[in-house]
């Protein structure tokens, strides 16, 4: 979904792309990578989930939490 330049979510998303190419991705196929510490975080989570994306919420320290949308 929305990442900001060299943000941690952007870095994790780039790593996820490489892992997906190698068929080793630990993330759901339709995932939005979102920084946990921005003013837009809640809005981006809601938007991604409402569009059926899983959310990979990425903290500044690189830790991740995967949120799955309701079916």
Image (cartoon, grey):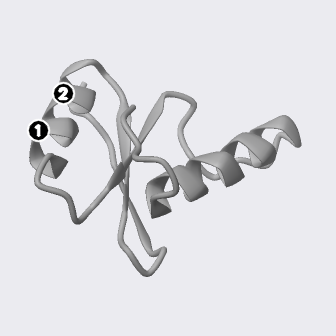
Label 2, secondary structure: give it.
helix
Q: Which residue is mark 2?
A: 47
In the displayed structure, 37 sits above or below 10; it is below
Q: Which residue is mark 1?
A: 43
**Which image quarter is the C terminus in?**
top left
Which residue ends up furthest to the front in the rendered image? 5
Q: What crowding class fits label 2: few (fewer than 14 Cα within 10 Å), some (14-19), or many (20 or more)?
A: some
Percent coordinates x, y for residue 65 in the rendering: 37, 63
Q: Nearer the viewer, residue 6 or 47?
A: 6
Label 1, secondary structure: give it.
helix
The Cα atoms of the two marked residues, 1 and 2, are separated by 6 Å
Relative to residue 4, is residue 67 drawn left or right?
Answer: left
Number of marks in picture? 2
Are the residues at dot 1 and dot 2 in contact (C-beta closer than 8 Å)?
A: yes
Percent coordinates x, y for residue 32 in the rendering: 41, 37
Residue at left offset 27%, top offset 30%: 48
Percent coordinates x, y for residue 14 in the rendering: 66, 47
Which residue ends up furthest to the top in the rendered image? 51
Residue at left offset 71%, top offset 40%: 17
Residue at left offset 18%, top offset 27%: 47
**Which image quarter is the N terminus in?**
top left
In the displayed structure, 51 sits above or below 59; it is above
């Amino acid at each position: 979904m929305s990442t900001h330049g060299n943000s941690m979510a952007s870095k994790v998303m780039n790593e996820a792309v490489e892992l997906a190419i190698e068929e080793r991705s630990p993330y759901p196929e339709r995932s939005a990578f979102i920084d946990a510490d921005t003013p837009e975080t809640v809005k981006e989570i809601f938007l991604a989930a409402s569009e059926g994306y899983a959310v990979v919420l990425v903290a500044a320290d690189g830790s991740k939490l995967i949120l799955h949308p309701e079916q």
